[in-house]
Image (tube, grey):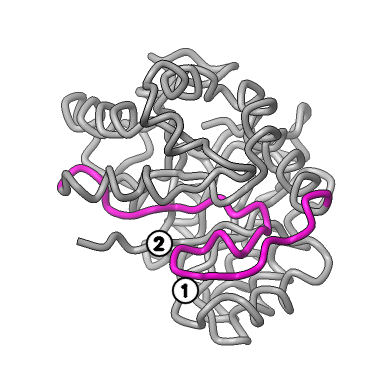
Amino acid sequence: MMFPVRIEVIPSQGIVGQVQALVPRTTTLSVTCLPHHGIERTLRTAVELGDAGYTVVPHLAARSISSTAELTGIVRACGAAGISEVFVIGGDRKQPAGVYRSALPVLEDIAQYTGGTMRAGVAGYPEGHPAVSPVDLLDGLLAKQHLAAHVVTQMCFSTEKIRDYAAFLRGEGVHLPVWAGVAGAVPRTKLVALGTQIGVGSSLKFLSRKGPLARKLLSGDRYSPDSLIASLESQPGSIAGIHLYSFNSLQSVPGNQLPAEPEQATTAALQTALIRGAARDS
């Protein structure tokens, strides 16, 4: 089988043109929300990509939303642009910009404002979260699942951990489809060096103990997700699709045979995204 693939991009300068040049219009794109960018840039980029013919899923970081009025405006803007799905996270801000401190009340208000017509994804953590206990993470998903369409996992490098996490959620009563968060093609040394910042150190250590598998996954100058995806596809049933963290290195799109981007630019995008991912809460 072939999993459906969604690609996460960072709304940096020039990304719309890069996507148009390198990514098929049939691809669904997820647009991040970084604290120093704010939701405005996320929405602007999402609307531009939508106008270019892509299906887009903007990230809404609860702690970056200043008020219920701002959330209402965001939902209206999405509706006007034909955007029918969002991805709701707690966000990275240490101090909330307004009344929202976590994803749940944002999901509740979106459902109220739209009558349930706006789909929403939520985050999951196969290897835990550095600031949230496992019990609280599970309780959060149980509380949110009636308002959510699916779970997108934090980046993970272990097929077993992804499958075990999906099975764990089902066993605990969370029945949302699980999309596996997978890193795209990025510089290998930077990926390993920064991996512990987002709580995925154990899956990287897992790879280091696996000998031939580790060499296959982490060989050469750049990490490639192909082997991990193939391994997930070899045992279908637990995973609904692949959420590819591209770090704006768009040659990582499966099936694209594109020249590598300059490592300096790719590494900068990678570091920004990894730091963002470290603080993404439930």
Looking at the rendering, the stretch of residues picked out in magenta corresponds to 237-264
Where residue 198 sits, quadrant-wise, is: top right
The label shown at residue 5 is 2
How many marks the image carries: the answer is: 2
| Residue at point 81%, 46% (across, down) | 268
Q: Is residue 40 visible?
A: no
Name the residue type under label 1.
Thr
Q: Is residue 227 found inside the magenta-colored segment of the image?
A: no
Residue under circle 1? 27
Which amino acid, by three-letter code, is at mark 2? Answer: Val
Q: Residue at x 15, y 47 (%)?
A: 237
Residue 236 location (% of width, % of height): 17, 48
Q: Is residue 78 visible?
A: yes
As rendered, which of 189 and 197 lies closer to the eye?
189
| Residue pictured at 56% horizontal, 75% vertical | 23
Residue 197, percent from left and from top: 66, 24
